Image: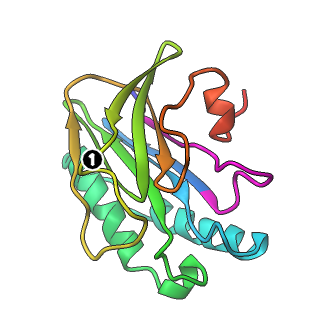
Amino acid sequence: MQIRAHFHGAPGRLPFVGHFAVQRSLGPVSLSVAGRVASRADVETAFRAARRLEHAVERVSLDPNSGGPAALSSTWAAIVAMEALDLGPRGGDDLSILLAASDARDISIAGMGLGGVWALRAGKLSPLATGDHPLLGEPGRPGQLPGVLGLEERIQDIVAVGAEHPVTSVQPERLLQRCGVHP
C-alpha cells in the first residue's frame, strides 16, 4: 500500500504558497513528503524553494531492503544537506514538513513545524498527534531527523497542519482539496 502525506493549506487568499509534495516507492517501500517552505516570501521565491526541496527528495535513493525508517532518515539527510539559500530567504527556518514511509511491516512518520497530524480513513479523521505530542513543534531544519512515530495500523492517507495554522481540529469534508489534491 502506498502511503500519502497531505499538508493542509494555510488560511487566506494564497493557501498553497511554498507547498511541496513528493510521492515515491520502490518495491515494498513507499515514501511521501508534503509541507511548506518560504511561505511568507514572494510567490516566485517560495515556488523555487519548494521545487528545489522536491528535487532533493526525488533524488533520495530508496532501498527496498532497508524499510521505511531508513527512507525517512535518508530523506531528512538530503534536506539537511541542501544549501540554506535554496530553501528561501529564511534558509529553511520556516520549514513545515510531514514525512511518511511504509514498508511491508510498518508505517513511520516524522515532521517539523507541525500543529497536528491525523489519519484519514473512509472519510473520517482520527488524531495521530495533537496537543503536546513530541512530533509537533516549531518550524525549522535541525541537523538530525526529528523523532519518528511508528504506527501499528495500516493507514493510507495522513494529513498535517502547520504549527502556525489556527485550526485545532480539521474537518473531513473537502479535506483533500484543502490540501491541494483535486480529483
Task: Please report the residue visible at 67 percent of the width from the left and 37 percent of the height from the top.
Answer: 178
Q: Name the residue under label 1.
A: 132
Residue 170 position in % (x across, y down): 53, 31
Residue 163 position in % (x across, y down): 46, 54
Task: Please report the residue visible at 48 percent of the width from the left and 67 percent of the height from the top.
Answer: 95
Residue 157 horizontal side relative to residue 44, left or right: left
Residue 19 position in % (x across, y down): 62, 57
Task: Please report the residue visible at 41 percent of the width from the left and 42 percent of the height from the top.
Answer: 116
Residue 6 horizontal side relative to residue 16, left or right: left
Dot 1 falls on a residue whose secondary structure is loop
Which of the two residues, 180 or 11, is positioned nearer the viewer here? 11
Assess disc 1: are there few (<14), some (14-19) or many (≥20) residues with their C-alpha within 10 Å of its C-alpha: few
Residue 56 horizontal side relative to residue 81, left or right: right
Q: Is residue 41 above or below residue 59?
A: below
Secondary structure mostly taken by the magenta-highlighted segment of the chain: loop
State the extent of the magenta-drawn residues as a range: 2-19
Q: Is residue 4 above or below residue 140?
A: above
Which of the two residues, 74 or 19, is positioned nearer the viewer here? 19
